[in-house]
Image (cartoon, rainbow, N blue to C red):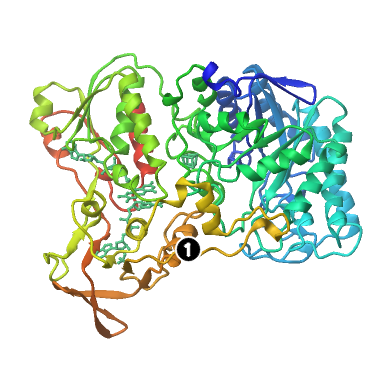
Amino acid sequence: MARFEQLFTPLTIGGHTLPNRVMMGSMHLGLEEAPGGFERMAAFYAERALGGVALVVTGGISPNQAGRPGVVGAVLDDESQLAEHRLLTEAVHAAGSKILLQLLHFGRYAEHDDLVAPSPLRSPIKARVPREMSDADVRQTIADFGRATRLALAAGYDGIEVMGSEGYLLNEFLAPATNQRDDAWGGDAERRRAFPLAVVREVRSALGAGPILSVRVSAVDLIPGGSTGDETLAYAGELAGAGADLLVTGIGWHESRVPTIATSVPRAAFAEFTRALRGAAGIPVAAANRINTPEVAERLLADGTADLVALARPLLADPAFVAKAQAGTPDAINTCIGCNQACLDHALSGRITSCLVNPRACHETQLVLGPTRSARKIAVVGAGPAGLAAATAAGERGHRVTLFEARNEIGGQFDLARRIPGKEEFSETLRYFTGELERRGVEVRTGTRATADALAAEGFDEVIIASGVMPRRPAIPGAESSIVADYAEVLRGERSVGERVAILGSGGIGFDVAEFLTQDGPANALSPERFAESWGVTQDPAVPGGVLRPRPEISRRRVTMLQRKATKPGAGLGLTTGWIHRAEVLRRGVEHVVGASYDEITERGIRITVDGVTRELEVDTVVLCTGQESVEELSAALAALGIPAQVVGGALLAGELDAKRAIKQGTEAAAAL
Ligand code: FAD
Ligand code: NAP
Ligand code: SF4
């Protein structure tokens, strides 16, 4: 398609010609270790290969026992494991793509007792201290990479990707912060490079000429004491000589205190580091990190940043990303919003990876939206995430669907979420659903509050109730004061907010509202330059790790966040994103009060008691972010009328509700029709 000319220009890598410039970056799926996981992975990868991805890279598999992520981590060290791997290679080949096995040694990030590293230094995000590798350990590990490569070839893989970024073992050898040896494997930059280069040479030797050898390289470490830009480029220049055909950029380590893939990171924020790597590499380089649309991918290819793009999460969100771009319908792509909620948060907590916007990801064989044999007349009540998912999935199955929404616009609470600075991507989900409603032939009636009698009068066969939640208004004395507003009123701009604010409730929405109210200019998420300056990311080639200190961004508005619990504020936020929200409000000068009881709200502020001491907080506005309550007024009346109904999302249960659960339940309800 002329529109994505670069994206669909073939590329030859190590003697293999790929039909387009999209490879699927490696992701740990959690299926690698699950019973029956390889069958499910085969279906997962095949769906992406059928969707047009030219080259698939598996999740990381360790070349030996010490390199496993945990006690049950996947290893390739024995012929008995080959049959499972053949399921993957055969499925992907049958779908017309190529597949590389990623070899990943966890180093000091491993969570078992036999973890090893170049030096006995604990990672700040892990509890265990690694054992220092002896010279013999290092040489054996290199040999183990060779053995795993030979086994991978026997399983039918088209080559290997060596994982050398994100702070895993190879990266640990490269960085002075983690390699404090003084022997053949450390001491100066050249000797710190010796182990990763030896691994690459060993893998090339085991592969022979022909199969593809990709190396994932940390283009910038983003940790104090990481490699400098000069060192990284020197290393990149040596990788081709060691046998690499392709470099894929990794950005930052898992322990970096700079966001690298969250939704608040601008699209393609780290492209300049990839461009520098490409200048030094002399072989094709793939860009990664927050490339979530074909337009961004095309731009990076066209402006010489990279030779191809490695997409990971965007292919969880939409397996047909490439096919839709090629068909000239990029608007039909279900866009990854960078939330991490069902992918990275799951992967790092031992759960099966999936996707907030596509609950079928990694559940392809379980959540099936097959065409219905008896099309029925279905009403879906509520156009929040749950109702949108239910209506579009039911329409996809061939039912005649009408979607009722009381407000004049779709989205429900998600329409509020997208107004938060740093959550701009959430608009893409509503854009996608708007198109899907049309493509699936759903009749949408906004501005229409559904009632049981009206649904009965129209003769619906079944109803999906997705009427969601409303903000909780706790019975605090004085809650009727004119200075009280709930978060929905504030985010919709229905209430003005003063310069001094108390936010009651420090959950996810409390933090979001704090960021909304302290956003004094355009959001950093919209500008890679502002983002880099704000978080201290630098391209100065002499700065170790490419990172300086983040910049304080004190807001002119004075905001205090309160909660009744005495626990750390934001303790329940996302596993991989909570720290970003906590750091963000800290930088903006937001104060926290925990363990508070709310005695009374007046026209001048709020009186609270903490640790037995009562005080008055003088504020202009009190914003309620005190949780939600379900809105569910239909099921009893429908039952009385004999109309079958399913209740999903917030309407079913308001506690710990998020869009991930809402979309999953809506999709499952449609699958069950
Ligand atoms: P809702 O979103 O509440 O939708 C219900 C809809 O039903 C509403 O539009 C309502 O008008 C309509 N309705 C009700 N009754 C009727 C009726 N009788 N007839 C017709 N229509 C009716 N979740 C995450 O996963 N990640 C996040 O980062 C995140 N951030 C958030 C940030 C903010 C500021 C907010 C407010 C929420 C956030 N959420 C987030 C939560 C997420 O938006 C909700 O969990 C999700 O929207 C719930 O979906 P739902 O469809 O069940 O209900
Ligand atoms: P939440 O995280 O459960 O927080 C609710 C807050 O209200 C808590 O701080 C609670 O703390 C307080 N509260 C509850 N009942 C109260 C009462 N009767 N009186 C006074 N305070 C009360 O819920 P939320 O912030 O409303 O968010 C809703 C859902 O949206 C969350 O479950 C979350 O999954 C989702 N969300 C996710 C993100 C994200 O980044 N992933 C962001 C926003 C929202 P105390 O009881 O200690 O006072
Ligand atoms: Fe993207 Fe969120 Fe889906 Fe992960 S869960 S793939 S970040 S949309």
Seen as rendered, the residue at the extreme top is: 373
Residue assigned mark 1: 583
Q: Picture quarter containing residue 117?
A: bottom right
Q: Picture quarter containing residue 467?
A: top left
Seen as rendered, the residue at the extreme bottom is: 613
Residue 161 or 642: which is nearer the viewer? 161
Using the rendered image of the protein, determine whether residue 112 is visible from the camera's viewpoint: no
Local secondary structure at mark 1: helix
Residue 145's x, y, as percent?
Answer: 82, 42
Residue 375's x, y, as percent?
Answer: 28, 15
- Relative placement, left or right, of 593 versus 23 is left
- Relative placement, left or right, of 238 versus 657 is right
Q: Compared with residue 298, is residue 526 higher up or lower down, i.e. above or below?
A: below
Residue 545 or 132: which is nearer the viewer? 545
Q: Residue at x 87, y 60 (%)?
A: 134
Q: Quadrant of ligand 2?
A: bottom left
Residue 29's x, y, as percent?
Answer: 58, 40
Using the rendered image of the protein, determine whether residue 171 is visible from the camera's viewpoint: yes
- Relative placement, left or right, of 365 versus 287 is left
Residue 314's x, y, as percent?
Answer: 52, 34
Q: Does the residue labelled 1 lie within 8 Å of ligand 2?
A: no
Q: How crowded is mark 1: few (under 14 residues within 10 Å), some or many (20 or more)?
A: few
Q: Compared with residue 92, is residue 336 higher up or lower down, i.e. above or below?
A: below
Residue 519 or 293: which is nearer the viewer? 519
What is the quadrant of the N terminus in the image? top right
Residue 423 or 111: which is nearer the viewer? 423
Total of numbered circles in the picture?
1
What is the quadrant of the C terminus in the image? top left
What amino acid type should be assigned to the residue bearing mark 1?
A: Ala
Q: Compared with residue 533, is residue 564 higher up or lower down, i.e. above or below?
A: below
Q: Residue at x 49, y 21 (%)?
A: 324
Q: Compared with residue 609, is residue 265 higher up or lower down, i.e. above or below?
A: above
